[in-house]
Amino acid sequence: MSDRHLLRRGLLGLTLASCLALAACNEGGDTAASIPVPTEGTVATPAESGQAIAIEAEAASMQLNSLAELGDKPLARRELNIQSWQTDGGAKVLFVEAHQLPMFDLRLTFAAGSSHDDGVPGLAMLTNAMLNEGVEGKDVTAIAEGFEGLGANFGNGSYRDMAVASLRSLSEPDKRKQALQLFSQVLGQPSFPEDSLQRIKNQVLAGFEFQKQNPGKLASLELFEQLYGDHPYAHSSEGTPESIPGISVAELRAFHKKGYTAGNAVIALVGDLSREEAEAIAAQASAALPQGPALPPPPLPSEPTAGTQHIEFPSNQTHLMLAQLGIPRGHPDYAALYLGNQILGGGGFGTRLMEEIREKRGLTYGVYSGFSPMQVAGPFMISLQTRAELAEGTLELVQRLVADFLQNGPTDAELERSKREVAGSFPLSTASNSDIVGQLGSIGFYDLPLTYLEDFMQQVQALSVEDVKAAMNKHLSPDGFVIVTAGPQVEQKPLPPPSTKPLEQPSSVPEH
């Protein structure tokens, strides 16, 4: 097996793991245009723990490194016995017993993302970011040292659909008890200190200034506004420069009381625990939260008006972003759309978009597409950047390739290749306990069946060319794209002719 195929298989596996798991394809788009399958969950917000990010990066690195040793050998599949119940406070619990390591992963997911900002953009993000800034008797430093002293990691993050808080700890009873006590206090009784709020606001506002120098970010923000209009998904989960300064501690307390209730929570738990121990942990976490019902999902978005918006930006490159409304999580067409997109542009090297735009013409360093199912219709997005003088021709080429794919569908060879790659990479989606806890959080939050992972694979393998073509045409239109470009207005040049041999060096290099 070639190194290139191993890389493609590895990237596909990580993409599949992300698309099936908690903070990835279920959360659309606050990202720069150069990230594969743009998703809000792939971007570190001020609310995310650096330790949690490091854990995920280490797991991804280990997964990719192991691929070089596998060759054509099949990956071992990890069977999951998912147990589920409900706490007295109304929290849904999903648990997988895993005794390979003396540790456990706990993740709480709340329907308390920015779609519940209620006219105050950034309220959900700031509430989540402030959870571990203070509790009675402990400031942010004492909390961090408390987790560190127990060998535990706290993580948190806020996105459009959801807010999360997680704990990774040793399962030894004494360490577990202390870590859970601190975690429960942080999650259920944050003090929201005023000085910490001002510090985080300053960090966020500084980030907004930095964004002004990032054309991909500017394009992404404009794209969501054009795609979603007055829908809650339209604004960034980070908030806006106008909204952040005025958010008060009182508003944070009120949002916490409403959004971080036991009835609004999904508890995912994986690790070296018995069912009895898992029930006790879930009950403790649930009891620590305010009591209250689940929040309703956001309303359905209206269909956007197709068209192109341009952001003038001084650079050598132009960012191109195209989007249409996609599907909600749990839609029956998701398997067909996922497989179709893997052939079109979601699978990295070997996809239609990458082969035609990068390999044959050298127009870009990378082009990516992806569906991001959410509580209601999440986006389907295509993103790339290219030389400014070739932007119009490249945009036309992308639209032409999409139209051709919708008209003719994939070939039998493309379909079978993608099925094999998805099957071969699927075990990576449950390769570690942190992967599994993400899957459980997603399954619980989006009310998917406990057999969802196996069902998905069976659905993918049963798909025909006609199934994929029909699903893609049902949900996408060649003329329905909302398009945002960011770059300089310069005289356009014709595209170079396609090469029969892959170009060694693309003419477009990502800007940083």
Image: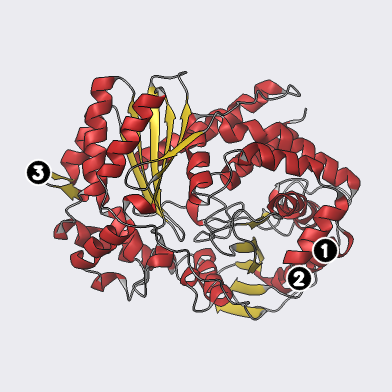
Residue 35 shown left or right of residue 370 in the figure:
left
Residue toward you, 212 or 269: 269
Secondary structure state at the residue bearing disc 2: loop
Q: Residues within 10 Å of mark 2 (few under 14, many from 20)?
A: few
Dot 3 or dot 2, earlier in sequence: 3
Crowding around mark 3 (Cα neighbors within 10 Å: few <14, some 14 to 19, many 20+) is few
Secondary structure of residue under mark 1: helix
Disc on res. 477: 2
Question: Could you tell me which secondary element the residue under label 3 belongs to?
Answer: loop
Residue situated furthest left in the rendering: 137
In the rendered image, residue 293, in percent from the top left (x then y), is placed at: 35, 57
Q: Nearer the viewer, residue 366 or 345?
A: 345
Circle 1: is it few (<14), some (14-19), or many (20+) Cα within 10 Å? many
Taking the image as shown, residue 159 lies to the left or right of residue 18, namely: left
Which amino acid, by three-letter code, is at mark 2?
Ser
Q: CA distance from mark 1 to mark 2?
A: 8 Å
Residue located at (50% from left, 74% from top): 231
User: Pointer 1: what residue?
Assistant: 406
Q: Which residue is mark 3?
A: 137
Residue found at the very far front of the displayed protein? 88
Give percent across and percent down for residue 8: 70, 39
Residue name at image x 63 percent, y 77 percent: 303
Circle nearer the N terminus (1, 2): 1
| Relative image position of residue 350 (x, y in whole percent) | 78, 46
**Could you tell me residue 404's position as x and y percent?**
85, 64
Residue 70 vs 488, above or below: the answer is above
Residue 84 appears in the figure:
yes
Q: Which mark is residue 268?
A: none
What residue is at 87 percent from the left and 54 percent from the top? 466
18 horizontally vs 239: left or right: right
> Disc 1 marks which amino acid?
Leu
